[in-house]
Amino acid sequence: MMNIFSFSRLNLYETCPRRFYLKYVEGMEEPPTEAAELGKAVHRYIELVLHGESDPMPIVLREAAVELKEKEIQDLALRYLKKHVTTPLQRYEGHIQVELDVRGAAFQGYIDLLDESGIVPVITDFKTGRVFYEPNDNMQLLIYAWLLHKKYGYEIVEARLWFLREAYKRAIKSVTYTKEDFEYAEQWIYETVNEIYGKLVQVDMEIVDALEAFPPRHGHACTYCPFAKHCRPDVAELPDEITAQTVEEVAGKILVLEQILAMAKEQLKAYAQTKGAVRVGDEAFTMRPSSRWTWPMEETKQALEELGQDPNEYLAFDNKSLQSLMQKDENAKEKLKTVGKEYITYSFVHMKAGDPHEERAAVLSSRRTSA
Ligand code: SF4
């Protein structure tokens, strides 16, 4: 039975118990992704430089599980290293582990940087992704601060996210945690770990099935889940009719099936790219070339005039530019609304819940139904 827990494990359990089970209990391997490997490479580069390595790049590239761009790693690492001020107490902390008072389990975390030079210790977590968010949008920093509190007894910890793709002025988001926060983190950890252990025991004793104890929790995570094809055996079964009771179930299955479809297409594309078209009966999957021209305005105008053509006949208003002008400028919007005509068509899509388009779609739909 698993006995090492971490923020990412508990977070995965909360995001989708099924994926947690497949990964950490069944031991299924997640294939490395470029984004995750880039993150690891940048962290490793910084770590090696701080430990005095003069030529870290060959080591970093050798350790990466996918091919990465040298320049991207270096640029991101230098965003931090150029600002780095060495103090004797600032160090790359790495692995911290504390014992949990449950079944001999332990909790671990990897802290990127620990600075103990001030009155309050500061931990920093580097982010190499493109998504910018607040420290308290998830529990990661709080859990790292709690680890430090448990290991070294600190009562106050400052924790920072450092977004390496952002300009320095807005790259750092900081938060301070105190004793009450640590109590909250500890409670969350113990409750979640106990819940997982409780379910594992029930599965072990065959009181409940693993799929029932650790059910799929559909959502945005499905769109990049490597375990989609192992998610649920009934994925291709549909109810005879769609009702308020079955609608969420069907929507969840669509998310899983879309991910399986995307993975199948990737496999087939990789094959077609090297070996050519794949025939299935009278259908074929193949790489279709498409070409697109761009036309520099002045030169094109001149060429058309030289050909004896009227350039105005070939010039069209660019819908995209006009729409973007309307979005940027209220005056332009009002003016253009009086000359343009808006056509609304509806296509059935799924999008992230809370997306501004979701609200607009609801307004437009209600206008359509009441018309
Ligand atoms: S496909 Fe979705 S519901 Fe299924 S395991 Fe992955 S994240 Fe969970």
Image (cartoon, rainbow, N blue to C red):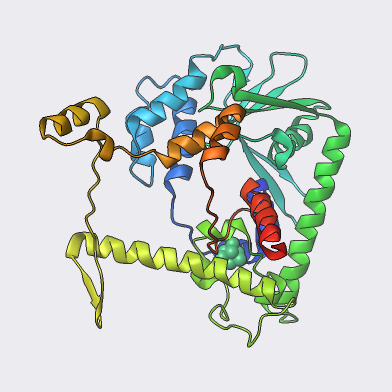
Q: Is residue 273 visible?
A: yes
Asked where in the image residue 274 lies, by quadrant, the reply is: bottom left
**Residue closest to the far right:** 180
Residue drawn at point x = 66 percent, y = 65 percent: 217
Residue drawn at point x = 36 percent, y = 46 percent: 66
On screen, residue 196 versus residue 57, left or right, reads right
Estimate the x, y position of residue 337 in percent, counting from the top left: 57, 39
Residue drawn at point x = 34 percent, y = 35 percent: 69
The quadrant the C terminus occupies is bottom right
On screen, residue 334 versus residue 300, left or right, reads right
Asked where in the image residue 120 lies, by quadrant, the reply is: top right
Q: Nearer the viewer, residue 138 or 266?
A: 266
On screen, residue 207 versus residue 240, left or right, reads right
On screen, residue 323 versus residue 246, left or right, reads left
Eyeballing the image, is 51 above or below 234?
A: above
Estimate the x, y position of residue 165 in percent, counting from the top left: 50, 28
Estimate the x, y position of residue 20 in percent, counting from the top left: 62, 61
Q: Nearer the viewer, residue 169 or 104?
A: 169
Ligand 1: image quarter: bottom right
Q: Is residue 9 visible?
A: no
**Residue closest to the far bottom:** 240
Residue drawn at point x = 39 percent, y = 38 percent: 318
Asked where in the image residue 59 lies, by quadrant, the reply is: top left
